[in-house]
Amino acid sequence: MDLRKSTQEKKDNNPPDYANFLRVFRPSHNAPAHIKSTISIDLKLFKEEYDKILEKSKDNRVNLTVKESSAGKIYTVYDTFQRDKQVKTSDHSPDRDDDDDMPY
């Protein structure tokens, strides 16, 4: 399998959903070391996107991921990652009886 091709297909199928109301900037070169970024929120855009954000929320929370493009630009997207359901051993063999007296 060509990893580049499968990665490109994945990108084309699910374009990122940008959080346009939120801007993240690198700190200036003379900022103290403990400052990692500057965040700006456009309140008008936030108000317009609020209902959209509520649809994406889980337990009244929404996660955003800060990313860097290949050109070096910083941007934010909604984090829609969900863990797969964990498969238990009982799911692999549902017909197996736990009271079986087999020695192995």
Image (cartoon, grey):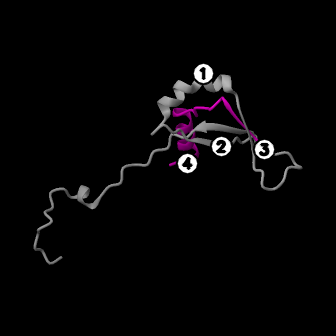
Does 84 sit left or right of 51 as displayed?
left
Q: Which mark is residue 48?
A: 1
For the residues labelled 3 and 1, the Cα–Cα distance comes to 26 Å
Residue type for callout 3: Arg
User: Which range is magenta?
Assistant: 1-25
Does 69 sit left or right of 9 as displayed?
right
Which badge, 3 or 2, is on the more N-terminal residue?
A: 3
At x 45%, y 39%, the residue is: 59
For the residues labelled 1 and 4, the Cα–Cα distance comes to 38 Å
Residue type for callout 1: Glu
Which badge, 1 or 2, is on the more N-terminal residue?
A: 1
Give the secondary structure at mark 2: strand
Give the secondary structure at mark 3: loop
Residue hosting label 4: 3
Which badge, 2 or 4, is on the more N-terminal residue?
A: 4
Name the image quarter holding residue 74. Answer: top right
Residue hosting label 3: 26
Residue 95 placement (x, y as % from top left)? 15, 57
Which badge, 3 or 1, is on the more N-terminal residue?
A: 3
